[in-house]
Amino acid sequence: MKKVFYLNTCDTCRKILAKFNLTGWELREIKKEPVTKEELAEMYKKTKSYEALFSKKSTQIKLRALDVKSLTEKDFKELLLDHYTFLKRPVFLTDQEIFVGNDKKNVEALQEFFGVS
């Protein structure tokens, strides 16, 4: 399995995806085709945390008046399944590894994984 979950309207996602040869990868635009329960379970197996997959920059947090500090793992799971903007992007998922988000450390790990500098 080689999947990338991203948002087409996200410039950062597009820049990161453009850095790599994604031939053979399934590209999933999460607004058009949201993450399934099974895919989220697969991500959870690798991160051991729904919070690690959760974007604390989602506009839905303010709209829903959520207090992120009081959320449980169950809450994070439900929110991730409820609305695509809660997923930290992009997510590169393979049988062995997962790369979540766009922070510098993650992008560097991706570059190492793809053998790109």
Image: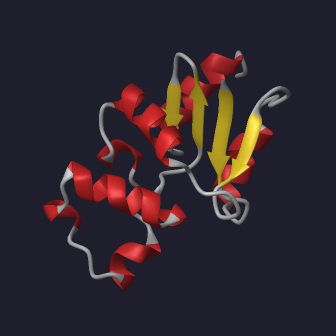
The picture places residue 19, in percent across and down from the top left corner, at 76, 36
Residue 64 lies, with reference to residue 116, above or below; the image says below
Report the front residue among 82 and 92: 82
The residue shown at (52%, 40%) is: 39
Residue 56 in sight in this render: no
Q: Which of the 4 image quadrants contains residue 24?
A: top right
The residue shown at (35%, 43%) is: 52
- In the rendered view, how is the structure colored? secondary structure
The residue shown at (41%, 46%) is: 53
Q: Residue furthest right?
A: 23
Residue 85 lies, with reference to residue 28, above or below; the image says below
Q: Residue furthest left?
A: 70
Q: Is residue 75 left or right of residue 89?
A: left
The residue shown at (66%, 39%) is: 4
Q: Quadrant of the N terminus?
A: top right
Residue 77 lies, with reference to residue 44, above or below; the image says below
Q: Is residue 93 left or right of residue 13?
A: left
The picture places residue 25, in percent across and down from the top left corner, at 77, 31
Report the front residue among 28 and 18: 28
Residue 65 in sight in this render: yes
The picture places residue 97, in percent across and down from the top left corner, at 52, 21
The picture places residue 17, in percent across and down from the top left corner, at 73, 42
Q: Which of the 4 image quadrants contains residue 75?
A: bottom left
Q: Quadrant of the C terminus?
A: top right
Q: Is residue 2 left or right of residue 40?
A: right
